[in-house]
């Protein structure tokens, strides 16, 4: 379950952001996970909740925004939503494409309480 | 008067694996500087990574200076098999982790004799999911699929097949005993990764081994120095 490693990285980023911005309690972490990644959202949320126990991040909501897969065909230059198990162009059938979106694994924003 | 608190939202936009990526970039830069071609071998458990590696190392003896980093959750069984080839090997036990990461590679490399090395093989933990997202600083990923696993693995685990430069089909000698269609397997790989080099191999008969060795050496020759 590599989601533990992913959750650990989110915790690291959160701690840095909290320290740099004087946040004393974290209430929300919004992340973006692409459709074409090897990340299972439920497993990640489970790992995150376990990991945050007894930390200033405990109780924070992990909002996972899933970004759909979007590709561009290099032959006909059409853009299309690929199927995860078939990335070929549905417009012209070409198997030559670039992924425009769907590989994201990003911490988008962090919300927390600050004194003053 | 008590201190009041206010809620603030900080835009971040940081890659979740940015720290791993930073270490991987350091590894890669160092490998390039040293002229070491690094291959990250990934497959399900039991697909034949270690057996292919042992045969590869024996074939490269006297031609390429190689070393191996072996990733397993437990035991040094694979490292012992590699050590018998005479090439340096470092076992990394990942414990609860189901993949190698860039910091593990950095540490393992510091403990390996790498002077004058041509090729470093990293045998990842047997798993088609977890290793996919963790860049180690390698020059390419190679995924193995044995014929006993069925033709559908590229469709079930598309990310790792998409990210790999080559797909090595292993245990091809078993085909007469199986309802396995290698052409269907190749078609499935193409749906996910049209550029992948597909190599059919058998360590039992040695068929395809030379193609694999030639591919490795060609890839090494393309390494920017």
Image (cartoon, coloured by chain):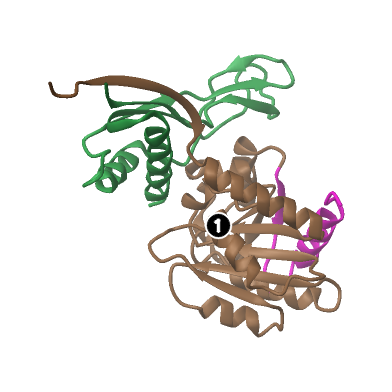
In the displayed structure, does residue B117 sit left or right of residue A10? right
Name the quadrant of the N terminus of chain B: top left
In the displayed structure, does residue A108 sit left or right of residue B47? left
Q: Nearer the viewer, residue B43 or B65?
A: B65
Mark 1, secondary structure of its residue: helix
In the displayed structure, does residue B172 sit left or right of residue B155? right
Q: Nearer the viewer, residue A95 or A113?
A: A113
Residue at x-position 83% and y-position 52%: B223
The image shows residue A40, relative to residue B125, as above or below, that is: above
Chain for colour green: A
Q: Report x, y in % for residue A50.
A: 25, 47
In the figure, residue B59 lies in which quadrant?
bottom right
The image shows residue B8, relative to residue A55, as above or below, that is: above
Which residue in the protein does label 1 denote?
Answer: B103
Bounds of the magenta segment: B196-225
Q: Nearer the viewer, residue A41 or B11?
A: B11
Q: Report x, y in % for residue A45.
A: 30, 39
Q: Count the labels in the image.
A: 1
Asked if residue A44 lies in the magenta stretch, the reply is no
């Amino acid at each position: 379950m590599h989601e533990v490693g992913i959750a650990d990285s989110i915790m690291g980023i959160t701690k840095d952001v909290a320290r740099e911005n004087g946040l004393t309690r974290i209430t929300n972490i919004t992340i973006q996970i692409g459709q074409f990644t090897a990340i299972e959202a439920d497993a990640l949320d489970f790992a995150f909740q376990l990991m945050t126990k007894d930390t200033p991040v405990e109780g924070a909501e992990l909002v996972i925004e899933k970004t759909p897969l979007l590709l561009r065909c290099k032959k006909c230059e059409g853009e299309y939503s690929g199927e995860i198990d078939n990335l070929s162009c549905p417009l012209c059938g070409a198997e030559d494409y670039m992924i425009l979106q769907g590989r994201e694994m990003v911490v988008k924003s962090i919300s927390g309480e600050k004194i003053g | 008067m008590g201190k009041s608190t206010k809620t603030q939202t900080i835009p971040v936009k940081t890659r979740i694996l940015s720290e791993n990526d930073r270490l991987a970039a350091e590894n890669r830069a160092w490998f390039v500087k040293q002229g070491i071609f690094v291959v990250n071998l990934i497959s399900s458990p039991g697909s034949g990574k270690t057996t292919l590696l042992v045969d590869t190392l024996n074939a490269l003896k006297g031609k390429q200076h190689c070393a191996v980093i072996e990733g397993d959750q437990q035991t040094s069984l694979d490292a012992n098999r590699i050590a018998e080839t005479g090439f340096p090997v470092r076992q990394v036990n990942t414990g609860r982790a189901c993949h190698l990461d860039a910091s593990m590679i950095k540490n393992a490399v510091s403990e390996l004799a790498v002077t004058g090395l041509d090729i470093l093989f990293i045998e990842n933990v047997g798993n088609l999911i977890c290793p996919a997202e963790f860049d180690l600083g390698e020059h390419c990923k190679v995924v193995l699929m044995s014929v006993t696993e069925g033709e559908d693995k590229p469709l079930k685990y598309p990310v790792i097949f998409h990210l790999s430069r080559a797909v090595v089909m292993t245990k091809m000698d078993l085909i007469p005993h199986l309802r396995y269609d290698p052409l269907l397997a190749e078609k499935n790989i193409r749906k996910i990764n049209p550029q992948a080099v597909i190599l059919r191999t058998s360590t039992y008969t040695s068929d395809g081994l030379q193609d694999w060795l030639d591919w490795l050496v060609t890839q090494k020759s393309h390494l920017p120095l």
